[in-house]
Image: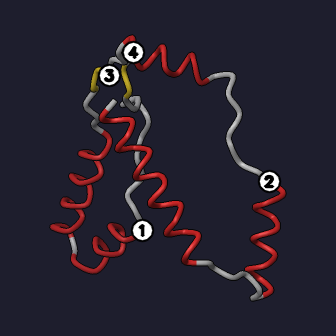
């Protein structure tokens, strides 16, 4: 797969370059034109995707995101009303639980 921009699309000189050109005369105009011509050139870069990534992408096609839209709306409303309360003990407990789970998984 090749990602590049077609080189036949002209790129207009930006307003800033035109303003500099008008203020500083022909030397600035030449610089602005050179900058514009450099920006129209693009280097093609070949990109390849491994079979592992393709299989992971295919496996994830049917999955739905793990987002509870009702819960998100509830939290958003509480935050906008200023009634959302953060419980640091619950956060700490979940962080420790997740860390313990990851350590157990890596050892086994």
Total labels: the figure holds 4
Q: Which residue is mark 1?
A: 15
Between disc 4 and disc 3, the foreground one is 4
Upstream in sequence: badge 2 or badge 1: 1
Other-residue count near label 2 (Cα within 10 Å), few / some / many at <14 / 14–19 / ≥20: few
- x and y percentages locating residue 39 in the rendered image: 29, 46
Q: Which residue is mark 4?
A: 52
Q: Is residue 34 above or below residue 65?
A: below
Other-residue count near label 4 (Cα within 10 Å), few / some / many at <14 / 14–19 / ≥20: few
Q: Which mark is residue 69?
A: 2
- x and y percentages locating residue 26 in the rendered image: 19, 67
Q: In the image, is 38 to the left or to the right of 10?
A: left
Q: Is residue 73 above or below residue 45?
A: below
- x and y percentages locating residue 29 in the rendered image: 24, 64
Helix, strand or loop under label 2: helix
How far separated are the C-alphas under marks 3 and 2? 36 Å
Q: Which mark is residue 88?
A: none
Q: Which is nearer the eye, 31 or 78?
A: 78
Upstream in sequence: badge 2 or badge 4: 4
Place residue 82 in its image quadrant: bottom right
Q: Are marks 1 and 4 in contact (CB under 8 Å)?
A: no
Upstream in sequence: badge 4 or badge 3: 3
**What residue is at 80 percent from the left and 86 percent from the top?**
81
Upstream in sequence: badge 1 or badge 4: 1
Q: Which mark is residue 47?
A: 3
């Amino acid at each position: 797969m090749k990602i590049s921009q077609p080189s036949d699309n002209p790129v207009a000189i930006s307003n800033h370059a035109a303003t500099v050109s008008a203020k500083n005369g022909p030397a600035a105009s030449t610089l602005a034109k050179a900058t514009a011509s450099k920006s129209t050139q693009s280097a093609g870069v070949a990109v390849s995707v491994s079979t592992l990534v393709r299989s992971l992408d295919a496996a994830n096609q049917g999955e739905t995101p793990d987002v509870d839209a009702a819960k998100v709306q509830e939290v958003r409303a509480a935050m906008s009303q200023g009634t959302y309360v953060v419980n640091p003990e619950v956060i700490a407990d979940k962080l420790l639980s997740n860390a313990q789970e990851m350590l157990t998984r890596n050892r086994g």
